[in-house]
Amino acid sequence: MIIALAHDKGGVGKTTTALNLAEILKPDIIIDQDTHNNLVILNQLRAENDQLNVLSNLNKSELINALSKSAQGLLILVDCGGFDSELNRIAIAASDLTIVPANDDINEVIGLKRFNKTLAQISADMGEKIIGHVMFNRVHHSRKNFNDVESFIASKDGEHLKRLDTVVPTSKWHGVAALDGYGVTNHKKTKYSDAARRIKALATEIKTKLNIK
Protein backbone atom coordinates (compact mmCIF):
# COMPACT_ATOMS: atom_id res chain seq x y z
CA MET A 1 0.00 0.00 0.00
CA ILE A 2 1.34 3.44 -0.95
CA ILE A 3 0.15 6.77 0.42
CA ALA A 4 1.50 9.93 -1.19
CA LEU A 5 1.27 13.45 0.18
CA ALA A 6 1.49 15.70 -2.84
CA HIS A 7 0.77 19.22 -4.10
CA ASP A 8 2.56 21.37 -6.64
CA LYS A 9 2.38 24.17 -4.07
CA GLY A 10 4.80 24.40 -1.14
CA GLY A 11 4.00 25.45 2.41
CA VAL A 12 0.75 23.53 2.75
CA GLY A 13 1.99 21.11 5.44
CA LYS A 14 2.87 17.94 3.53
CA THR A 15 5.89 17.14 5.71
CA THR A 16 4.11 17.87 9.00
CA THR A 17 1.18 15.73 7.90
CA ALA A 18 3.53 12.92 6.84
CA LEU A 19 5.29 12.98 10.21
CA ASN A 20 2.00 12.93 12.11
CA LEU A 21 0.51 10.13 10.02
CA ALA A 22 3.69 8.08 10.38
CA GLU A 23 3.17 7.97 14.15
CA ILE A 24 -0.21 6.26 13.73
CA LEU A 25 0.00 4.34 10.45
CA LYS A 26 3.49 2.98 11.21
CA PRO A 27 4.68 2.77 7.58
CA ASP A 28 7.46 0.32 6.82
CA ILE A 29 9.16 2.86 4.55
CA ILE A 30 8.94 6.65 4.41
CA ILE A 31 10.28 8.38 1.31
CA ASP A 32 11.32 12.02 1.60
CA GLN A 33 11.31 13.61 -1.85
CA ASP A 34 11.54 17.22 -0.68
CA THR A 35 14.72 18.98 -1.78
CA HIS A 36 15.30 20.20 1.79
CA ASN A 37 14.99 16.69 3.26
CA ASN A 38 12.95 18.03 6.18
CA LEU A 39 11.68 14.61 7.21
CA VAL A 40 15.25 13.35 7.38
CA ILE A 41 16.19 16.29 9.61
CA LEU A 42 13.15 15.81 11.87
CA ASN A 43 13.87 12.10 12.14
CA GLN A 44 17.38 12.85 13.40
CA LEU A 45 15.86 14.77 16.32
CA ARG A 46 14.12 11.65 17.61
CA ALA A 47 15.57 9.28 20.16
CA GLU A 48 18.04 7.01 18.38
CA ASN A 49 16.07 3.86 19.20
CA ASP A 50 12.82 5.47 17.98
CA GLN A 51 13.79 6.72 14.54
CA LEU A 52 11.68 6.12 11.47
CA ASN A 53 12.85 4.32 8.33
CA VAL A 54 13.26 7.35 6.07
CA LEU A 55 14.79 7.14 2.59
CA SER A 56 15.84 10.29 0.74
CA ASN A 57 17.67 11.55 -2.33
CA LEU A 58 16.47 8.57 -4.37
CA ASN A 59 17.02 8.55 -8.11
CA LYS A 60 14.35 7.24 -10.48
CA SER A 61 15.50 3.62 -10.36
CA GLU A 62 15.83 3.66 -6.56
CA LEU A 63 12.38 5.21 -6.16
CA ILE A 64 10.70 2.64 -8.39
CA ASN A 65 12.47 -0.15 -6.50
CA ALA A 66 11.36 1.24 -3.13
CA LEU A 67 7.77 1.68 -4.29
CA SER A 68 7.71 -1.86 -5.68
CA LYS A 69 8.08 -3.20 -2.14
CA SER A 70 4.41 -2.40 -1.59
CA ALA A 71 3.72 -5.60 -3.53
CA GLN A 72 5.28 -7.44 -0.61
CA GLY A 73 2.62 -6.04 1.71
CA LEU A 74 4.68 -3.11 2.99
CA LEU A 75 3.07 0.24 3.77
CA ILE A 76 4.94 3.11 2.12
CA LEU A 77 4.42 6.80 2.87
CA VAL A 78 5.79 9.34 0.38
CA ASP A 79 6.32 13.03 1.15
CA CYS A 80 6.47 14.60 -2.31
CA GLY A 81 8.17 17.95 -2.76
CA GLY A 82 6.12 21.09 -3.33
CA PHE A 83 6.82 21.15 -7.05
CA ASP A 84 6.10 19.18 -10.21
CA SER A 85 8.71 16.60 -11.17
CA GLU A 86 9.03 13.18 -12.77
CA LEU A 87 9.78 11.56 -9.41
CA ASN A 88 6.73 13.11 -7.76
CA ARG A 89 4.58 11.96 -10.67
CA ILE A 90 5.92 8.42 -10.35
CA ALA A 91 4.98 8.37 -6.65
CA ILE A 92 1.50 9.75 -7.35
CA ALA A 93 0.91 7.28 -10.18
CA ALA A 94 1.92 4.37 -7.94
CA SER A 95 -0.03 5.47 -4.88
CA ASP A 96 -3.20 3.84 -3.59
CA LEU A 97 -4.17 7.17 -2.01
CA THR A 98 -2.89 10.64 -2.81
CA ILE A 99 -3.54 13.22 -0.10
CA VAL A 100 -3.41 16.89 -1.08
CA PRO A 101 -2.99 19.15 1.97
CA ALA A 102 -4.51 22.52 1.12
CA ASN A 103 -4.76 25.84 2.93
CA ASP A 104 -7.74 28.16 2.70
CA ASP A 105 -6.04 31.32 1.44
CA ILE A 106 -7.15 33.19 -1.66
CA ASN A 107 -4.51 31.52 -3.84
CA GLU A 108 -5.53 27.95 -3.04
CA VAL A 109 -7.89 27.55 -5.98
CA ILE A 110 -5.06 28.61 -8.29
CA GLY A 111 -2.74 26.01 -6.78
CA LEU A 112 -5.34 23.26 -6.91
CA LYS A 113 -6.23 24.13 -10.50
CA ARG A 114 -2.59 23.64 -11.46
CA PHE A 115 -2.35 20.38 -9.51
CA ASN A 116 -5.58 19.11 -11.09
CA LYS A 117 -3.88 19.54 -14.48
CA THR A 118 -0.92 17.53 -13.19
CA LEU A 119 -3.25 14.75 -12.09
CA ALA A 120 -5.02 14.87 -15.46
CA GLN A 121 -1.70 14.43 -17.25
CA ILE A 122 -0.72 11.51 -15.00
CA SER A 123 -4.14 9.96 -15.62
CA ALA A 124 -3.67 10.24 -19.37
CA ASP A 125 -0.25 8.60 -19.12
CA MET A 126 -1.56 5.80 -16.88
CA GLY A 127 -4.81 5.22 -18.76
CA GLU A 128 -6.82 5.49 -15.56
CA LYS A 129 -8.30 8.32 -13.56
CA ILE A 130 -6.04 9.45 -10.72
CA ILE A 131 -7.73 11.29 -7.85
CA GLY A 132 -6.16 13.62 -5.29
CA HIS A 133 -7.93 13.78 -1.94
CA VAL A 134 -7.91 17.35 -0.67
CA MET A 135 -7.40 17.79 3.08
CA PHE A 136 -7.92 21.27 4.49
CA ASN A 137 -4.86 21.87 6.63
CA ARG A 138 -3.43 24.73 8.69
CA VAL A 139 -6.73 26.57 8.60
CA HIS A 140 -8.15 28.86 11.30
CA HIS A 141 -9.85 26.80 14.01
CA SER A 142 -13.12 28.70 13.55
CA ARG A 143 -13.24 28.12 9.80
CA LYS A 144 -16.14 25.83 8.89
CA ASN A 145 -16.93 26.69 5.28
CA PHE A 146 -14.60 26.29 2.29
CA ASN A 147 -17.08 27.25 -0.39
CA ASP A 148 -14.61 28.61 -2.96
CA VAL A 149 -12.44 25.51 -2.95
CA GLU A 150 -15.39 23.11 -2.71
CA SER A 151 -17.05 24.80 -5.68
CA PHE A 152 -13.84 24.39 -7.66
CA ILE A 153 -13.54 20.71 -6.72
CA ALA A 154 -17.12 20.16 -7.86
CA SER A 155 -16.44 21.83 -11.22
CA LYS A 156 -15.02 20.37 -14.43
CA ASP A 157 -11.67 22.02 -13.66
CA GLY A 158 -11.43 20.03 -10.42
CA GLU A 159 -12.54 16.64 -11.72
CA HIS A 160 -9.41 14.90 -10.42
CA LEU A 161 -9.96 16.13 -6.88
CA LYS A 162 -12.18 15.02 -4.01
CA ARG A 163 -12.37 16.34 -0.48
CA LEU A 164 -11.52 14.45 2.69
CA ASP A 165 -13.90 15.07 5.59
CA THR A 166 -11.22 15.72 8.19
CA VAL A 167 -10.02 19.29 8.71
CA VAL A 168 -6.73 19.95 10.55
CA PRO A 169 -6.59 23.49 11.98
CA THR A 170 -3.40 25.36 12.63
CA SER A 171 -2.02 24.59 16.08
CA LYS A 172 1.07 25.46 18.10
CA TRP A 173 1.24 21.84 19.24
CA HIS A 174 2.51 20.62 15.89
CA GLY A 175 5.58 22.81 16.30
CA VAL A 176 6.10 21.74 19.91
CA ALA A 177 6.14 18.06 18.95
CA ALA A 178 8.23 18.61 15.80
CA LEU A 179 10.99 20.28 17.85
CA ASP A 180 11.80 16.78 19.10
CA GLY A 181 11.07 15.12 15.75
CA TYR A 182 7.69 13.70 16.75
CA GLY A 183 4.09 14.01 15.67
CA VAL A 184 1.49 15.31 18.09
CA THR A 185 0.12 11.86 18.97
CA ASN A 186 3.52 10.62 20.16
CA HIS A 187 4.84 13.49 22.26
CA LYS A 188 4.13 13.71 25.97
CA LYS A 189 3.26 17.42 25.79
CA THR A 190 0.84 17.10 22.87
CA LYS A 191 -0.66 13.61 22.79
CA TYR A 192 -3.82 14.71 24.62
CA SER A 193 -4.28 17.92 22.62
CA ASP A 194 -7.03 18.76 20.15
CA ALA A 195 -4.33 18.65 17.46
CA ALA A 196 -3.70 14.99 18.29
CA ARG A 197 -7.42 14.26 18.15
CA ARG A 198 -7.64 15.77 14.65
CA ILE A 199 -4.69 13.74 13.40
CA LYS A 200 -6.24 10.57 14.81
CA ALA A 201 -9.44 11.41 12.94
CA LEU A 202 -7.47 11.89 9.73
CA ALA A 203 -5.69 8.57 10.19
CA THR A 204 -9.01 6.84 10.82
CA GLU A 205 -10.48 8.31 7.62
CA ILE A 206 -7.45 7.14 5.64
CA LYS A 207 -7.60 3.64 7.14
CA THR A 208 -11.26 3.41 6.23
CA LYS A 209 -10.62 4.43 2.62
CA LEU A 210 -7.79 1.93 2.27
CA ASN A 211 -9.38 -0.78 4.41
CA ILE A 212 -6.41 -0.77 6.76
CA LYS A 213 -7.00 -2.21 10.23
Image: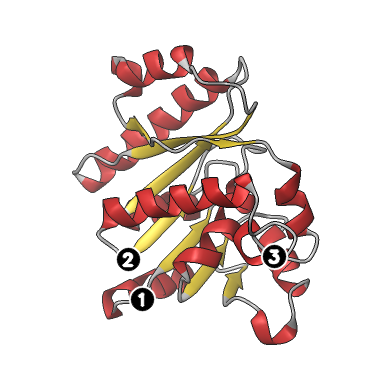
Q: Does residue 59 appear anywhere in the picture?
A: no
Disc 2 packing (10 Å; few <14; some 14–19; many ≥20)? many
Q: Which numbered disc covers residue 1?
A: 2
Quadrant of image for the N terminus: bottom left
Secondary structure under badge 3? loop
Secondary structure under badge 1? loop
Of label 3 and label 1, which has the lower sequence position? 1
Give the colour scheme shown. Answer: secondary structure
Q: What residue did someone put label 3 on?
A: 187
Q: What residue did someone put label 1 on?
A: 74
Query: Which residue is situated farthest in the left direction here?
Result: 127
In percent of width and height, residue 65 lies at 40, 75
Residue situated in front as seen by the camera: 42 or 190: 190
Q: Does residue 203 appear anywhere in the picture?
A: yes
> At label 3, which amino acid type do we have?
His
Q: Quadrant of residue 143?
A: top right
User: Number of callouts in the render?
Assistant: 3
Q: Residue at x 49, y 59 (%)?
A: 78
Of label 2 and label 3, which has the lower sequence position? 2
